[in-house]
Image (cartoon, rainbow, N blue to C red):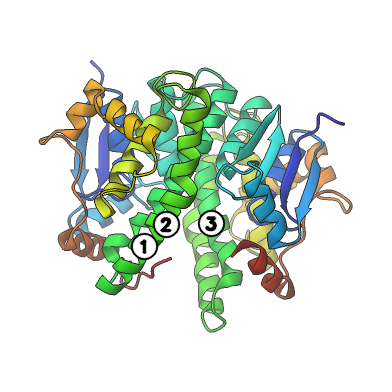
Amino acid sequence: MSGKPRLTYINGRGRMESIRWLLAAAGVEFEEVFLQTREQLLKLGQDGSLLFQQVPMVEIDGMKLVQTRAILNYIAGKYNLYGKDLKERALIDMYVEGLADLYELIMMNVVQPADKKEEHLANALDKAANRYFPVFEKVLKDHGHDFLVGNKLSRADVSLLETILMVEEFKSDALAKFPLLQSFKARMSNIPNIKKFLQPGSPRKPPLQEKDIPSLLAIFS
Amino acid sequence: MAAKPVLYYFDGRGKMESVRWLLAAAGVEFEEVFLETREQYEKLLQSGVLMFQQVPMVEIDGMKLVQTRAILNYIAGKYNLYGKDLKERALIDMYVGGTDDLMGFLLSFPFLSAEDKVKQCAFVVQKATSRYFPAYEKVLKDHGQDFLVGNRLSWADIHLLEAILMLEEKKSDALSGFPLLQAFKKRISSIPTIKKFLAPGSKRKPISDDKYVETVRRVLRMYYDVKPN
């Protein structure tokens, strides 16, 4: 019986991946329970473990936390990755929420009808290149620091790295016009906890494969 | 002399309404700039005040905050409506996450066809009565206190009241079967700042109508083909 946080989700990225990233960046080891059938999910809902009958769910410090943001906020606060005051937190929240919008947009590509997929992806990549990445390039340029907020590592940096890597899975030269983001990516990837997470054998999950979609939809719908 | 927060959005509920609720409940007066034309919006975009080219945007304490969650988190923290420690904040975040999901199903409602509105209404009511309201009823039952978290008013209570009233606009007896939520609704509604917000003449916005839909479409050039859940 360990005191490690325990994550309950499917064996895939989805809405749990940013939680895995944040725990890993904080150097926190965790356990995972993977749902494989709809029955398993329903059973968890019935026994009161899931406040809204949904996952992600993370058991941590005696709580059964659900709602991705609640989980991320708690972990960030506990491990000092959430800024030093309300104003830094506001900046971090703005950045993280913007990145979450981009992440969600890309994540939704897999469930688009076949004839809309390409257009949808093009739109998402356009947003990355013209709405989101320029903002973070400018933030780094304006203050000249290594990290987005408060001159120290925060969840905003972790979130940005995660998103950059995901976009690059779809477009390998996504950072071509963003030199500061390129050096940010190199710098962040070298942080020991993060470097470890990026290596094979870590809890990081691979991108969703088309063939896995039907079984996932079966669990959730 | 502190300047009042200024809210930039459409003259309607949308994603800004929860911000209005929270400021009002905290007793904070605010001003509003309503987007009405495409030109106005393009000017805002060019001025660089919208970090991700989107509204809501709130000018507060020298910041131009965007992203609804960032705005709400800041206001809740500033006005002591966010619990006393990390664990209370986690509970509040969980509860607000649920009501946010529930009210989120109604965001697209004004933009739907008449037929789709009927479908969406049924969908939202079903989710409210089978998933969300039972969860909050149980929270209140388990601790027997007047408020959701920490035995004092927090953002979670304000957000839940907002959600309850929105659901009741769709189904007036949405709370039947939830006696503790009924009592909760009465109790929170009678808190002076909230009572004032619920009275005519406040900054609370009415249910979005066709004029609102037209304005949003005209200004953003989006949301022409919205589907129900």
- SS at circle 3: helix
Q: Is residue A183 visible?
A: yes
Residue sitting at 60 percent across and 62 percent down?
A107
Q: Residue furthest left?
A: B201
Q: Residues within 10 Å of mark 3 (few under 14, many from 20)?
A: many
Q: Which residue lies furthest to the top in this view?
A: B1
Find the distance from the CA under tag 1 to the CA under tag 3. Answer: 30 Å
Check the image and report above or below for B125 versus A83. Answer: below
What type is the residue that disc 2 sits on? Answer: Gln
Residue B122 is tagged as 1
- Which residue corresponds to mark 2? B126
Q: Can residue B64 be seen in this view?
A: no
Q: Where is residue B16 in the image (x, y as percent from the top left)?
A: 31, 44
Q: Quadrant of residue B122?
A: bottom left
- SS at circle 1: helix
- Which residue corresponds to mark 3? A102
Check the image and report above or below for A208 versus A29. Answer: below
B223 lies left or right of B145: left
